[in-house]
Amino acid sequence: MAEKMKKRNDGRYVSRVTLPGGEKIDVYGKTQREVKDQIDEIKLKYAMGTTSIKNKIILTEWANIWWDTVKKSKTGVSSQEGYLRAINNYILPELGHIKVTDVRPVHCQKLLNSMSDKSQSQQRQVKAALNGMFKYAVINGLIFGNPAQYVEFSVPADEKRNALSPEQVKILLKIAKGNRAEILVHLALYCGLRRGEIMGLRWNDIQGGQLHISRSVQVVNNKPEIKDPKSKAGFRTVPIPIHLQEMLSEVQRISEYVVPSTKGNLLSKTAFNKLWNPVLKQLPFKMVLHQLRHTYATNLHKLGLDPKIMQYLMGHAQLDMTLGTYTDIQDEQLLQASQKIVNILSVSQKSVKTA
């Protein structure tokens, strides 16, 4: 119930509300109507089950609670690192000082708008973190609605990372030739391996002109750790083009790993950058290693491979990543793919004529 409203010396009105649980709240307003409206809102919140009407917890504190309770150690390492970057680099610097109950959709949208020059993946990670922590606040009765639920992010014009053009492939191969990163480049470009799969590839995974992918590597605090491939579909057998088979046969083996550090160990983040960055610096265009997988998929398409075979070779769990529905791949189909992939080196450096 609310006590009688009083007018203060500063001209404002005040009334004290006592909730059924004994919690007392002083409500202030410039007019009696403003105070009455606030009291009605408090009663409504209590009736709907809000646990603490006076909750003054700020977003920084709530983010820590949400992280420790919901996310910490409950997702993959790379996913956790992405959430932490989103929280610490973007969300808390802008919104961390605001009470959870005071955050509105406009705050969340302004944050996403300020990231218009950032990548789509960074914006998506920030939105996911905002959605997660505010959804948990709704579940726990701190707020009634999720202020981040309908925010939208914009994609930078240059966000899309296409496959390399034939001319770019020629330039890359020329720069990588004789470089420590040459095998890395060819495994990504002509076998479609992900970075972690290349890092975890062992010589005994190469048998009969094929790569048997059964592990990957994730780097945590600059320390490489062996893990399973990205999904069940990541376990696969990939044909090795003839030119790459010849290159691999000539590599001096200093380690059980095909692409190791200079000391023969698994590549750390630092060691990987020392291997790959010198190539990037010499390129006359910007690119990331993952674009070589895109280029591999494009070249498979040029070769006319069945979409389901493409999905299998790419290690995609869902064909909407490549073109259709995942199915089992038979040995004879792999043999046909192997025969076609013999020509992938030349195809990658030729333009496709269009009508």
Image (cartoon, rainbow, N blue to C red):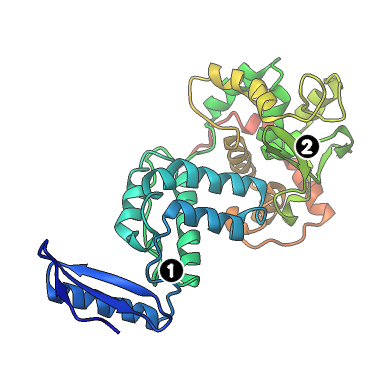
> From the image, which quarter does the N terminus lie in?
bottom left
The reply to whether residue 19 is visible in this rendering is yes
Residue 338 sits in quarter? top right
Residue at the front extreme of this rendering: 9
Q: Position of residue 191 (x, y in %)?
A: 71, 38
Q: Secondary structure at mark 1?
A: loop
Vertical arrangement, residue 242 with respect to residue 178, above or below: below
Viewer-side residue, 287 vs 226: 226
Q: Secondary structure at mark 2?
A: helix
Q: Residue at x 43, y 59 (%)?
A: 57
- The numbered mark at residue 200 is 2
Q: Which numbered mark, 1 or 2, is in the foreground of this view?
A: 1
Q: Amino acid at mark 2?
A: Gly
Q: Decide: few, some or many residues near mark 2? Use Cα within 10 Å; few <14, some 14-19, many ≥20.
A: many
> From the image, which quarter does the C terminus lie in?
top left
Q: Position of residue 54 (x, y in %)?
A: 37, 67
Residue 293 sits in quarter? top right
N-terminal label among 1 and 2: 1
Q: Are marks 1 and 2 in contact (CB under 8 Å)?
A: no
Q: Residue at x 57, y 36 (%)?
A: 291
- The numbered mark at residue 142 is 1
Viewer-side residue, 347 vs 66: 66
Q: Is residue 306 left or right of residue 241?
A: left
Vertical arrangement, residue 57 with respect to residue 1, above or below: above
Q: Is residue 320 left or right of residue 74?
A: left
Q: Is residue 204 left or right of residue 84?
A: right
Q: Position of residue 64 (x, y in %)?
A: 53, 53
Q: Residue at x 49, y 59 (%)?
A: 133
Q: Position of residue 277 (x, y in %)?
A: 60, 22
Vertical arrangement, residue 235 with respect to residue 265, above or below: below
Q: Amino acid at mark 1?
A: Leu
